[in-house]
Structure formats: C-alpha cells, structure tokens
C-alpha cells in the first residue's frame, strides 16, 4: 500500500478520483439515498483531512503489531506535545475522547485513586467512611453533575453546587468566598473535598471564573482543579486575559478543537498533569491498546495541515468577529451587552431592553410615570417576547451565524453569538459590509402584531437602528452579501398603539 503516511494519503486520494472519473460525474447530494439526501455540507480541505484520518486509521490498524505500536505512540506523543505548546500547558499528558464530558469523568476517577490509597482494594467502603465532594458552579452546563454521578457510581449528595456572585463581580462567576466556606463545612463534617470544576467561559454567557484565586484555594485544601470552557481557546493567542491565563496552571482542562477549527469527527481533548502512570492507567486516561491511541490521528493530520499559524488564525478570526459585533452593538441604543472581556471574549450575549424604574438592577431607569410592579412585569415579559422574536428573525436571515436564543434568570431572554463554535465551519468575511449588493432579504413582521410597541417608543427606535446598522449579525457571520429592505420596525403596520 505504501511506505509511509504521505504515500498512503496520496493513494487514497487517487483512488477516490478514479472512482469519480469512472462514474463520469462527481458525487452530488441527490445521489445519496435516505435521510442524508440533501444534507451534505462543504467542510473544506481541513475537514477532509480530519475525515481522511479516520479512513487512514482503519488502514494503520492492520499493520504489524510492532510497527503499529511505534507509529501510534509517535502520533499520540506528537499531538500531545503540539497541543501542550499551543495552549501553554507545560509537561502535560493528553486523553482523547469522543464524549466531551468523558474526560472529566476519567479525571474524577484519577482524583479518587490519588486521594484514596486503599480504593483499589476496599472499593466504595473507603468512600463510605469519608465521602468525596465534587464542587460545581451554579453556572455549569446542565446535566454535568448527574452525568458524573452516573459514571462514577456516586450518590448525588457527593455533588456540591457553588452559587455565583450576587454583590461583587459577574453574576455568572463562582463565588470564591462562599466556596471556601463550603469547603470548611465539608471538612468539619468528615468529608473529603475532592475536585472543583471551574469555567473558562460559562455555558450560558461565556464568563470566566477567577481561576487564579480558585487555584490558590485548591492548593490550600488539596483539591484537584479542572477547567473547561470555550475561552480556553484564547490560550493560543498572543493576548490572553489574566483569568484565562491562570488555567494553564490547573491540574487538568478539557478542550474541543473540532468546533474551534471547523473539523468534523475530531475528538475532544483533556490535558492533565500526573506523575504516576499506574494510576492514570487504572483511571482509564492511558491505554496499552494501539488502536486507542489512533483517536488522535484525525487531529494529528489536521494540525500538520493547518500549521501553527493556521490554527491560531482561526481562533483569532472568531474573536475578531465577536469584537466586531460588540462594536456594532455599542452604536445601538437600549441594548445591554453581557461581555466580560471586550478585548478577547469569543462570546457575545446581548438583549434589547426598555429601562424602567423598579425593574431588575441590570436595567437603568428611563422615567415612566406611575409604573406599577405589575406594569414592570408586563413590560419585562414584552421585552422577552421581543428578543425571542428578534432572535428567530436573525437566525432566519443568517442561518450560518449560529445565533441562539436563551433565557437567563436575572437578565431575561438574551441572544448569544459564539463564532468560535460555528465560524470555522462556515467561512466568514469581515468585509462583507462593504458589499451590500444582492437581493433584499425579507423579514417576517407578522409576529410583531402581538408586541405592545409604539412607533415612537425607545424600543422601536433602537430596533430600527439595529437593522439600519447593516444588520449586525449579517456583517459578522454570513458568507454571502445581503442587502436588507426597509426596516420592519419603521413599518406602521408592524406596531400596535
């Protein structure tokens, strides 16, 4: 078949080309029967490299055992070294896994084996005498705690939910002072603080916990610190916020380079530091099977194809899209942006609001006479309905933007733009706003009839301004020029008195 990987790749490509020539046509979506028909997506050259890795892995697995062992060891060690250097994680090891949460479950097993020396012999009897505690932020992604308990066989009381800040700092950051109080209480009750899961980009709004302070707390009490979140991608950039940079000193962290780079079927990666290979083997983080090491092959090929500059450029591009959106949003009145770090945050969460006295403290008041609490509630409900409608319209206008609508407890209904999870898979161009030629994109205003807005209201003026600002989402995340027709918010029929 070939003397090396490069020759094997070339032979696979030539084989595919010959097949297409024999058929006399290229594969089109209509040729595929069943539910896949019409769903083929252009994944780009780097995506083809990732897919090629899976095919090549099947071929490599048939090699002689000794050659297979040497080759898979080299692939795993190279990929681990590259990732550790890119993300500033010195002397780390890597575990590649398909399920994004699987890496954290393995890390929890490693922490249990490290803290309970007799666990291998006595099993859960050791845990019964001194129950472990896993600390999760209230802003953690839904279902994470239940998943860990199911995977580890632990009861739910082993989970401790840490509330977020209520007075100082972001309301989406873990309350460090309250966490320390919880740790002290657990120690007094005879429990063992085992592991803390911190966020470098919460699932909802992309805010980062005070990882530096949390690291100090974990070292003080002997707790394993694990970090996850989309903001970890910025570790590859030249400028990194101090809160995210502190994640490079944590005990482990989970990343998802597949969505960041627009690579299909690429595994998630958990980087960790541990000196005992026997414990990592027992925990399932390492394996003696060469085929398990081949999980890194798609990423190994993709990293060689992209190179360091290509890797960093994709992450930098996504952050620039977020910054561009922030700059446009700042020009719009009556809009709140929930961005933690304007210079490097890859996530933008925003919402339209009408400032009312007596409403949520995040909204500053515009004088509205004789507004009762029930009136404030109705206005808040109207704002939420408006934001939901606006989100649906923008998603229809720009499907490739990846814009999502979500409900936050304090802020209400918000719109979330996270190009790092979508932009690499849907190529974008920041200069599209200079080319506004094309067919006008219609906007459905039928849903506006239920919104209690007047044409001269501050909310309607803000919405009108948004659509006349070149359609912000279209500027930042669409791959074809768009010219909007008249703003739907300037149409008298779109409003009720």
Image: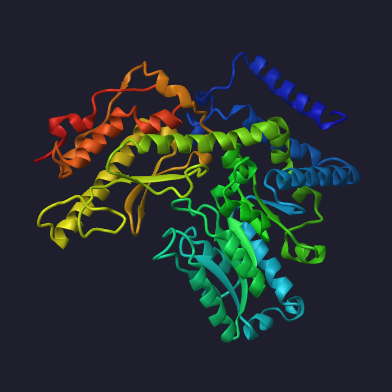
Q: Is residue 330 left or right of residue 202?
A: left
Depth check, front residue: 439 or 83: 83
In the image, farthest residue toward the right: 66
Residue 322's spot in the image, x, y percent? 47, 38
Q: Identify whether 195 is placed above or below 447.
A: below
Depth check, front residue: 98 or 37: 98
Residue 489's spot in the image, x, y percent? 21, 33
Q: Quadrant of the N terminus?
A: top right
Depth check, front residue: 363 or 95: 363
- Residue 424 seen anywhere in this rendered image of the structure: no
Looking at the picture, the colour scheme in use is rainbow
Q: Identify whether 467 is placed above or below 72.
A: above
Q: Quadrant of the C terminus?
A: top left
Residue 138's spot in the image, x, y percent? 46, 64
Q: Is residue 254 left or right of residue 292?
A: left
Residue 83 is drawn in which quadrant? top right
Residue, x 78% and y 24% (percent of image)?
Answer: 11
Q: Is residue 255 left or right of residue 284?
A: left
Q: Identify whether 50 is placed above or below 74.
A: above
Residue 315's spot in the image, x, y percent? 58, 38
Residue 442 is drawn in which quadrant? top left
- Residue 195 seen anywhere in this rendered image of the structure: yes
Q: How many marks?
A: 0
Residue, x 49% and y 70% (percent of image)?
Answer: 161
Q: Is residue 264 left or right of residue 70?
A: left
């Amino acid at each position: 078949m070939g003397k090396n990987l490069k020759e094997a790749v070339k032979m696979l490509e030539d084989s595919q080309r010959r097949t297409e020539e024999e058929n006399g046509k290229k594969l089109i979506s209509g040729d595929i029967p069943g539910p896949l028909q019409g769903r083929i997506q252009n994944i780009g050259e780097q995506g083809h490299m990732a897919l090629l890795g899976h095919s090549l892995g099947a071929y490599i697995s048939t090699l002689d055992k000794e050659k297979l062992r040497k080759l898979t060891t080299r692939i795993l060690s190279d990929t681990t070294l590259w990732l550790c250097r890119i993300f500033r994680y010195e002397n780390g090891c890597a575990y590649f896994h398909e399920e994004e949460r699987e890496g954290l479950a393995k890390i929890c097993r490693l922490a249990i084996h490290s803290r309970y020396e007799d666990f291998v012999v006595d099993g859960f009897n050791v845990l019964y005498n001194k129950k472990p505690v896993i600390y999760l932020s209230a802003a953690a992604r839904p279902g994470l705690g239940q998943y860990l308990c199911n995977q580890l066989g632990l009861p739910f009381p082993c989970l401790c939910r840490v509330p977020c800040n209520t007075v100082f700092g972001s309301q989406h950051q873990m309350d460090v002072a309250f966490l320390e109080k919880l740790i002290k209480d657990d120690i007094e009750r005879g429990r063992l603080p085992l592991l803390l899961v911190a966020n470098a980009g919460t699932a909802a709004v992309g805010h980062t916990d005070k990882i530096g302070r949390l690291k100090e707390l974990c070292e003080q009490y002997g707790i394993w610190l694990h970090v996850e979140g989309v903001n970890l991608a910025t570790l590859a950039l030249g400028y990194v916020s101090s809160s995210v940079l502190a994640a490079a000193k944590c005990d482990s962290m989970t990343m998802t380079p597949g969505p960041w780079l627009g690579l299909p079927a690429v595994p998630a990666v958990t980087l960790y530091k541990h000196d005992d290979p026997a414990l990592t083997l027992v925990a399932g983080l390492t394996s003696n099977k060469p085929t398990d090491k081949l999980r890194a092959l798609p990423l190994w090929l993709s990293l060689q194809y992209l190179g360091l500059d290509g890797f960093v450029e994709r992450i930098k591009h996504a952050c620039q899209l977020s910054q561009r959106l922030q700059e446009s949003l700042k020009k719009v009145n009556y809009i709140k942006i929930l961005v933690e770090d304007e210079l490097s945050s890859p996530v933008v969460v925003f919402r339209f609001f009408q400032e009312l006295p007596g409403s949520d403290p995040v909204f500053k008041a515009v004088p509205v006479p004789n507004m009762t609490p029930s009136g404030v509630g109705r206005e808040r409900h109207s704002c939420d309905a408006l934001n939901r409608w606006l989100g649906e319209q923008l998603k229809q206008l720009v499907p490739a933007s990846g814009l999502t609508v979500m409900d936050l407890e304090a802020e209400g209904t918000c719109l979330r733009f996270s190009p790092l999870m979508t932009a690499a898979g849907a190529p974008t161009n920041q200069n599209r706003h200079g080319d506004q030629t094309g067919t006008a994109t219609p906007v459905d205003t039928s849903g506006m009839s239920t919104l209690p807005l007047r044409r001269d209201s501050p909310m309607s003026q803000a919405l009108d301004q948004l659509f006349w600002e070149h359609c912000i989402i279209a500027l930042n995340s669409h791959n074809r020029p768009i010219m909007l027709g008249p703003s739907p918010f300037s149409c008298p029929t779109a409003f009720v008195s």
